[in-house]
Image: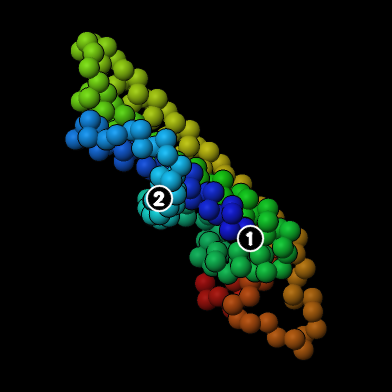
Amino acid sequence: MTTTNVFAELLIIGIETMAWIALLIFSLWGYGWIDFAIFNNLVIAIPLAAAAYALGIMMDRVSDGLLAKADHTIRKNVLGERAAKSFSQLRSYVLAKSPYLSTDLDYLRSRLRIMRSSTINFGFLALTSAAFILTRVETAAHTKYWAATTAFFTGMLLCSLSYYAWSISSLTYYLRLQTAFALLPDDDAKSNKEEKPASTPTRNRSGNGHPEENGASG
């Protein structure tokens, strides 16, 4: 994946994160102390982009930790228990053997990372947007509660859709990885004079279609 693609990916995640953080701050302390005219100046775009990028990195790690258990379950269901444990070796093997397959897998991984972080961000947006309406919007009480409820459930709907998209993208990613491994030339076909490192994954000859780790102890 190119540096530009990584930057764009983290920037998208960071902008989402910045949105709910801003709503949280406005809910707690209001927004009368901010001169919004400053945002018309292009100079402010540089520090904002830097802040969004930093927030994107942090939220990517946070969302990875929060959804790690669900991700491992999907990985284990597709690849099998042993291959799931040696996932990093399996992925490195495929990426090293085929630049074309590497590009395809990186594209899928980029999409699932955005959806993974969006799942968390939309959840926070649902809460903070409802809080902002209840605390800072001046209108009739019934209108305020209706707007806050609508904002909350809209955010939760987007959260649910993002989670669904992430789970489907993860499933597709692991299936593509498994297929890519199966399509690559088998190093076992080389001369037996050439020894492979113990960490190199090999084909599972039992016919169940799951890649396994060479020399694994079960």
Earlier residue among tags 1 and 2: 2
Pinpoint residue 176: horizontal percent, then vertical percent. Answer: 66, 52
Q: Assess whether mark 2 and mark 1 are in contact (beta carbons under 8 angstroms).
A: no
The image shows residue 213 at horizontal and vertical percentages of: 59, 71
Relative side of 104 to 72, left or right: right
Across the whole image, how many numbered discs are drawn on residues?
2
Q: Residue at x 39, y 29 (%)?
A: 155
70 left or right, relative to 204? left
Binning the other alpha carbons within 10 Å of mark 2 as few (below 14), some (14 to 19) or many (20 upward) gives few
Please state which amino acid type lies under the numbered disc 1.
His
Name the image quarter holding residue 79: bottom right
Query: What kind of residue is marked 2?
Result: Pro
Q: Which residue is drawn at 42% across and 28% down?
A: 157
Query: Which of the 4 image quarters holds residue 158?
Result: top left
Disc 1 designates what residue? 210
Under tag 2, what secondary structure? Answer: helix
Judged by depth in the image, the label closer to the viewer, 1 or 2, is 2
Question: In this rendering, would 163 be left or right of 94?
Answer: left
Q: In this view, does 84 lie above or below 117?
A: below
Q: In whole angstroms, how far apart are the C-alphas of marks 1 and 2?
A: 47 Å
Q: Nearer the viewer, residue 49 or 9?
A: 49
Across and down, in percent, residue 80 comes to 56, 58
Residue 34 in the image: state x and y as whole percent: 27, 35
Residue picked out by circle 2:
47
Give the residue displayed 62% in from the left and 58% down from the top: 2
Q: Can residue 62 be seen in this view?
A: yes
Q: Quadrant of the N terminus?
A: bottom right
The residue at the point 46 percent across, 42 percent down is 42
Q: Is residue 173 visible?
A: no
